[in-house]
Structure formats: structure tokens, C-alpha cells
Image: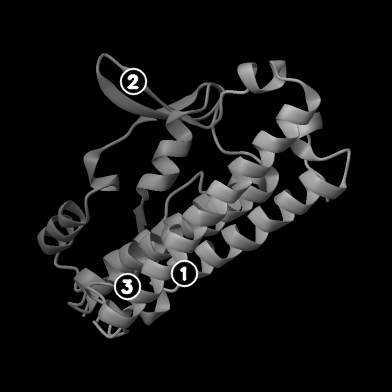
């Protein structure tokens, strides 16, 4: 049995990060072909075998190699700063794990695609409710700011009440969604939809709470956000 302990692969996340750079290490094109520049005066063609697991397997078959220890090729993610390095490293690890599971064990790691989608649902709904509190949703305030002070206060209360009504609808139908579809299984993960459908009623409930806070602010606090254009804690 032959084992290759020095097999390299470039995850797409690392490649995309390198393509966005203007200085080494970076990926650039010359005569329509991709090159990778490791440092000043050090560049090499970037062969498709770095990106395609099928090509790696073909090379292994040609050389009579039974197994390979797959690792991320240089320059890796060490050159990235703390702001983006962790994100790229996580994406690279997930992609590499999915390749090993698919081609090494014959079973795809489905959660690498499905779980981020469900997390995005939670983030989107929670961000919508926080946007109510911070007044970060899209709005046209030119006419609003031109109104007299008391008119702005009254209109601010009315708008907050409308948001409260919208939150009630999201909350009510969110509960219906959980009751009707929460017991269904997720697409590829053996868990039920109770894990992500509650994002809808929870977001609606928070919208109502935050909208009521804005109503109280407009009535009892002269520095309320509808008047000053800022958020009141």
C-alpha cells in the first residue's frame, strides 16, 4: 500500500482571498492563465489539479497511490489578518472536510451547506428586529424632518404602532409555521425544523417589544429618536 503524505489542495475560499489581493501572496492571470505569486520574483503556474479532487485522484491512480494525506497548499491563510483570516480558515476547513468525507469515506458532509443556510435565517430575522430598535431600516426622512416638532412626534408614534402591527403578524404566522411545519425533517440533516422555524415568531415578538419602546420614547422622552434622528438607549 502506497500513501502520499504530501498532497496539496487549494480550497476555493483561499483562492478567492488570493485573487482579491494586489500584492504577494496573490493569484493573478498572465495570458489568460492563472499564476500564484508567493513573493517578489517567485511565481508559478496554478494548475487545475490544485482545485479539482477528481484530478488529484487521477494522478494518484496513475502513480499507483492508494491513499493521500490532503492538506491546504501554501501560502495557506497565515498571511491574512485577524479580520478575515478566521473566516477564510473556517471555510477552507469545511471544504476540505467535505472533500475527504465524499471521496475518502463515500459520504458527503451535508451540514457544511445546510447549517450555514439555517444560521443565515436566524441572523436575518434577528437583525430585522434589532433594526426596528435602532431605526436602521430603509426610510425617506426628508419630508418627515421638515414637519413641525409635534407632528413628528405624532407621526413617530403612528409609525411605531404600524411596526408593532407588522411584528404581531410575523409573530402570529410564525407560530403557525412552527406548528404546521416544525415537525418536518430538514432536507439532509436528521433534525426537525423546530431548530430554525422559531426564528420567525421570536423576531416578531422582539419587533413588538422594540416598537412599544419607541412609542414610549416618543411620548415621554423629549430626546426621542423620531425627533433627534438618533437612537435612545
Name the mark on residue 177.
Answer: 3
Q: Residues within 10 Å of mark 2 (few under 14, many from 20)?
A: few
**Residue in the picture at 37% in, 50% down:** 11
The numbered disc on residue 29 is: 2
Please tell me whether mark 1 sits on a helix, a strand or a loop.
helix
Q: Are marks 3 and 1 in contact (CB under 8 Å)?
A: yes
Name the disc covering residue 221, or none.
Answer: none
Measure the C-alpha gap from mark 2 to mark 1: 49 Å
Mark closer to the chain start, 3 or 1: 3
Residue 77 place in picture, x, y as percent: 55, 48
Mark number displayed over residue 201: 1
Residue 214 picture location, percent across and down? 72, 49
CA gap between label 3 and label 1 equals 9 Å
Residue 134 lies, in percent from the top left, at 69, 45
The structure residue drawn at horizontal position 54% and vertical position 47%, both measured from the top left corner, is 162
Q: Is residue 79 above or below residue 208?
A: above
Amino acid at each position: 500500500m502506497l500513501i502520499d503524505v504530501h498532497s496539496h489542495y487549494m480550497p476555493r475560499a483561499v483562492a478567492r482571498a488570493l485573487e482579491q489581493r494586489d500584492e504577494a501572496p496573490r493569484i493573478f492571470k498572465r495570458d489568460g492563465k492563472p499564476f500564484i505569486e508567493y513573493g517578489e520574483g517567485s511565481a508559478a503556474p496554478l494548475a487545475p489539479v490544485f482545485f479539482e479532487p477528481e484530478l488529484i485522484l487521477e494522478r494518484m491512480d496513475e502513480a499507483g497511490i492508494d491513499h493521500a494525506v490532503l492538506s491546504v497548499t501554501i501560502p495557506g491563510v497565515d498571511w491574512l489578518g485577524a479580520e478575515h483570516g478566521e473566516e477564510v480558515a473556517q471555510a477552507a476547513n469545511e471544504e476540505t472536510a467535505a472533500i475527504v468525507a465524499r471521496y475518502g469515506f463515500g459520504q458527503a458532509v451535508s451540514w457544511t451547506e445546510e447549517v450555514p443556510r439555517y444560521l443565515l435565517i436566524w441572523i436575518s430575522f434577528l437583525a430585522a428586529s434589532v433594526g426596528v430598535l435602532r431605526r436602521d431600516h430603509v426610510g425617506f426622512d426628508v419630508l418627515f424632518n421638515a414637519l413641525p416638532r409635534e407632528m413628528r412626534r405624532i407621526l413617530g408614534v403612528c409609525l411605531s404602532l404600524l411596526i408593532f402591527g407588522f411584528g404581531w403578524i410575523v409573530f402570529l404566522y410564525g407560530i403557525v409555521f412552527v406548528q404546521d411545519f416544525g415537525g418536518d425533517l430538514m432536507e439532509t440533516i436528521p433534525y426537525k425544523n423546530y431548530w430554525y422555524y422559531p426564528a420567525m415568531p421570536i423576531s416578531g415578538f422582539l419587533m413588538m417589544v422594540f416598537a412599544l419602546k419607541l412609542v414610549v420614547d416618543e411620548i415621554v422622552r423629549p430626546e426621542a429618536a423620531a425627533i433627534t434622528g438618533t437612537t435612545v438607549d
